[in-house]
Amino acid sequence: MMTDIKVISLNVNGLNNPIKRKKILLKLKREGGYIIFLQETHLSKEEHQKLERIADAVVFSSSHSSARRGVAILVRNNIPFQVGKLLADKDGRYILVEGKIEETEITLLNIHNPPEQGPELMAKMIALITSEAKGTTIMGGDLNLIMDPKLDCQYNVKHKAEKTSALLKRAEAEIGIIDVWRKIHPNERDYTYYSKAHNKYSRLDYFFMFKSDLEKVKQSSIGKIDISDHAIISMELTLAIEKGVSTWRLNSSLLNDIEFKKRMATTIKQYIEINDNGEVSPLMVWKGAKAVIRGEIIAFSSFKRKQREKERNNLVNKLTILQEEHKNRSSKQILDEIDEIKKRIDYLDMEKIERELTFAKQNYYDSGPRAQKLLAWRLRRQNNKASIFKIKDRTGNMLIKRSEIAKEFVKYYQKLYALEIQENRMEKNLKVFGIYHSARSNGRSKQSSN
């Protein structure tokens, strides 16, 4: 099955603050990324592990000895990713992960090229993907360079990382890597970074892939500069994988909503009046009630969510228009309007974070790695360990796709239970035969004694 997978990259400019960390993860969730590159996390190895608990993802990271730099790759738990090789920089500048998503080989290389870094790091990265990359290869992150000063910089000026840019351009010609966004938008001007100090926009964040993999790319885009000083960059790939399914859970914050409680009371009352008539068993009434209640909760939650998203989308659209205007005409008035809209968006995000903290009980988690091991975290790890990524069928063939694994289990248990039924019948027949044989033997004994 061909599935679209969204890949995201963002320089987060620090995740030490728990509130900012939650805001960033909320934004990434809203963007719908399945594979996420983060730069400048400023987290230690232990702090990176926290991301697994609140992001519902497997995290691969590289940290610096001090609270700076740091990169991480997040792969959502509903993507069946199997790690083959992991290469991490001790200075927190890059991490390479090579593995498989079902039968598809994939290599992920996340880079943060510090501004003070010379061309040596990029030379190492080019050598790395040349020697280590397998299958579909994605190299991306905050490269802190400008590939084309005429299109990638607001004022058409040279960037100090000119030597690094030249090295990357040579790699494009020699090993066939390509700037994905620029390939899809050859003459477009857009930027991923805004410097308040210099009042200047630049495109510093990139995705590179081999030309042979470009046919898998559906689209590539640059987002808004809002929660960080960098914009999210994203692209959608079409890969031969199957997505997992999620489990529905009640959002307990709804129990404090007066409108919700009134609506549910009316729904339950109407259901009981119609169905609890003495003709239907209590068990069936209860089972039907659960389905009706769940459907009503989902409908109400969807209505409320759409209301909030409509307001937020209107603000984001207004922010987009103002930022485009500011890119073409620097004005303090426009900048002030941008800041006001960002504050309003931030307020809406904070409301959602509060709901999610109540929902997921993440307030216990924030006490750090030495905190109590939450039941939710244990269950998530337990479920992950219990997941089956591959099995051998009866003929010895390796099965990797989830649908094939499920079918093989169905066949196995059908055969197993059919065998048990046959054994039970045989045992019953033997018992009957034993009784008949015993009766005949007793009859013969009586005849011989007479």
Image (cartoon, grey):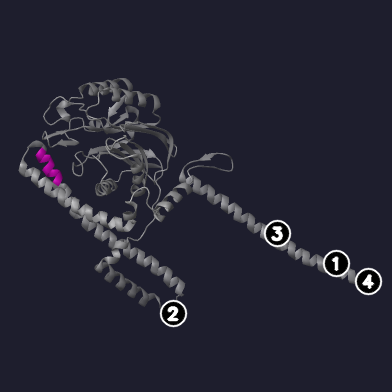
Q: Nearer the viewer, mark 3 or mark 4?
A: 4
Please state the extent of the stretch shown in magenta in the rendering: 319-326
Cα gap from disc 1 to disc 4, whole angstroms: 12 Å
Q: Secondary structure at mark 1?
A: helix
> Residue sitting at 25 percent across and 55 percent down?
352
Question: Mark 2 Cα within 10 Å, few/some/many (few <14, many 20+)?
Answer: few
Q: Earlier in the sequence, mark 1 or mark 4?
A: 1
Q: Earlier in the sequence, mark 1 or mark 2?
A: 2
Residue at which label 2 appears: 278
The amino acid type, in three-letter code, at marker 4 is Ser
Q: Earlier in the sequence, mark 1 or mark 3?
A: 3
The image position of residue 216, as x and y in percent, is 34, 35
Residue at which label 3 appears: 426
Going by the image, does 195 lie left or right of 21? left
> Residue sitting at 57 percent across and 53 percent down?
414
Residue at which label 1 appears: 441
Q: Earlier in the sequence, mark 3 or mark 4?
A: 3
Q: Secondary structure at mark 4?
A: helix
The image position of residue 442, as x and y in percent, is 85, 69
Question: Mark 4 Cα within 10 Å, few/some/many (few <14, many 20+)?
Answer: few
Cα gap from disc 1 to disc 3, whole angstroms: 22 Å
The amino acid type, in three-letter code, at marker 2 is Gly
Q: Nearer the viewer, residue 49 or 132?
A: 49
Cα gap from disc 2 to disc 4, whole angstroms: 66 Å
Which label sits on residue 449? 4
Cα gap from disc 1 to disc 2, whole angstroms: 57 Å
Our reading of the magenta stretch's main secondary structure is helix
Q: Can residue 106 be seen by looking at this rendering?
A: no
